[in-house]
Amino acid sequence: MEKQLEPIRNKIYEIRGQRVMLDRDLAELYGVETRVLNQSVKRNANRFPEDFMFQLTKEECLRSQIVTLKEKRGHHIKYMPYVFTELGVSMLSSVLRSETAIEINIEIMRAFVAFRHITTLPDTSERFERIESEINRIKQEMEESLADQNDINESTRAQLDAISEALAELQPREPKPRRRIGFIQEE
């Protein structure tokens, strides 16, 4: 069962913070041409609001590794692809009525559920919380250590200032008159 879902799971992408599937991948899975899938969707446009399906922008296509452009003439995409959210994929089953479409749709829904299950495992959230608390503990220890070091520097600085002042007090204020060195001739 898990191995059956893997090819479908590899065609689920995250775009605009949502898990989606490309129209061309869905068409391939359903065994129809992409244009036929999109025509069926357009004929039933009222069933596909924006949270079910949206069209990628050119920037999203160029930025992502989902849509690859070929070097040859005529192999660039003319139309930006549509992507379907989990809700949109489930709505496709009411638009595409073949037996193959129903079977594939069931597998796709299982893949979406499996994907959601992976990201919401309790062990994962507990581990994230444990890691976060460990990071906060280490951060607190580092801040305390730096504060202690700063206190030491300030006390050391104060001691050095006191030593400098003591040395300054030991220095004579006015120099004593000195006797001249050398041969002194009396006048």
Image (spheres, rainbow, N blue to C red):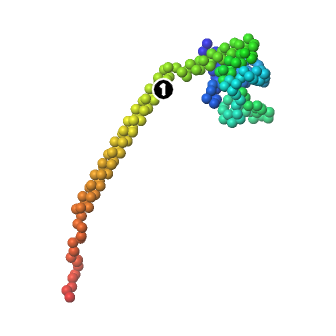
Amino acid type, callout 1: Phe
For the view shown, which residue lies furthest in the right direction? 74
For the view shown, which residue lies furthest in the left direction? 186
Q: Is residue 83 visible?
A: no
Residue at the spot 80% in from the left edge and 33% down from the top edge? 74
| Position of residue 83 in the picture relative to residue 35 (left or right) | left
Q: Relative to residue 88, is residue 1 depicted above or below?
A: above
Residue at the spot 33% in from the left edge and 45% down from the top edge? 151
Dot 1 corresponds to which residue?
128
Q: Position of residue 122 (x, y in %)?
A: 50, 20
Pick the quarter of the image with the C terminus. Answer: bottom left
Of residues 128 and 185, which is closer to you in this image? 128
Mark 1 packing: few (<14 Cα in 10 Å), some, or many (20+)?
A: few
Residue at the spot 66% in from the left edge and 32% down from the top edge? 64
The quadrant in which residue 38 appears is: top right
Q: Is residue 76 visible?
A: yes
Residue at the spot 75% in from the left edge and 16% down from the top edge? 96
The quadrant in which residue 112 appears is: top right
For the view shown, which residue lies furthest in the front direction? 46
Q: Relative to residue 31, is residue 58 depicted above or below?
A: below
Q: Position of residue 145 (x, y in %)?
A: 36, 39
